Amino acid sequence: MTSIPERKAQLLARLHELQGRLDAVEAELDSHDAKDWEELATEREGDEVLESIGVSGQAEIRQIRAALLRMEEGEYGYCARCGAEIGQDRLDVLPQTPFCRNCAA
C-alpha cells in the first residue's frame, strides 16, 4: 500500500514534469517566424497539435492540484461523489482521481 506522503511525492513529480512540458510547448509556439505561406501552414498545423497537448496538460495539472488539496484536507483516497474509499489499484494508475471505479463509470 502506497502512503499519502509517497502519493504526494508522486503527484508533485508529475506536476513538475507537466510544468516543464508546458513551458516547452509555450516556447515552441512563440518561436515561429516562417516567411512563406507553405511553411506557415505547416507551422500552424503543428501549433494545433501543441495547443491540444497544452490543453490536456493544463487539465491534468488542475486535477493534480485538486488531489493535493484533498490530501491537505484529509479527503484524499475517498470518492468525491459517494464517499467510498478509492481502491489502491485505481490510485496506482490514476493517483489524481477524485472518483472510485463505480462513480467514474
Image (spheres, rainbow, N blue to C red):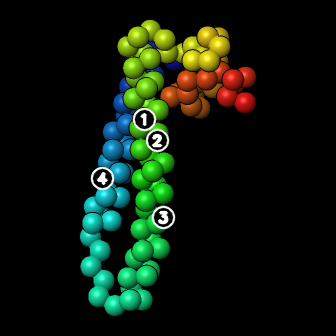
> Which comes before the other along the chain, label 4 or label 3?
4
Q: Give me the C-alpha separation between circle 3 and circle 1.
A: 20 Å
**Location of residue 84 in the rendering, given as x and y in whole percent from the top left corner:** 65, 11
Residue 62, disc: 1
Residue 23, disc: 4
Where does label 2 land, which residue? 59
Residues at discs 4 and 2 in contact (Cβ within 8 Å)? no
Q: Is residue 53 left or right of residue 20?
A: right
Where does label 3 land, which residue? 49
> Which comes before the other along the chain, label 4 or label 2?
4
Residue 18, disc: none
Residues at discs 2 and 1 in contact (Cβ within 8 Å)? yes
Callout 1: SS = helix
Vertical relation: 19 (above or below) 10: below
Hey, what amino acid is under mark 4? Asp
Mark 4, mark 2: which one is toward the viewer? Answer: 2
Callout 3: SS = helix
Residues at discs 3 and 1 in contact (Cβ within 8 Å)? no
Instruction: Sort mark 1 into few (<14), some (14-19) or many (20+) by Cα contacts within 10 Å.
Output: some
Instruction: Sort mark 3 into few (<14), some (14-19) or many (20+) by Cα contacts within 10 Å.
Output: few
**Location of residue 69 in the rendering, given as x and y in whole percent from the top left corner:** 39, 20
**Location of residue 76 in the rendering, given as x and y in whole percent from the top left corner:** 49, 15
Vertical relation: 34 (above or below) 9: below
Hey, what amino acid is under mark 2? Ala
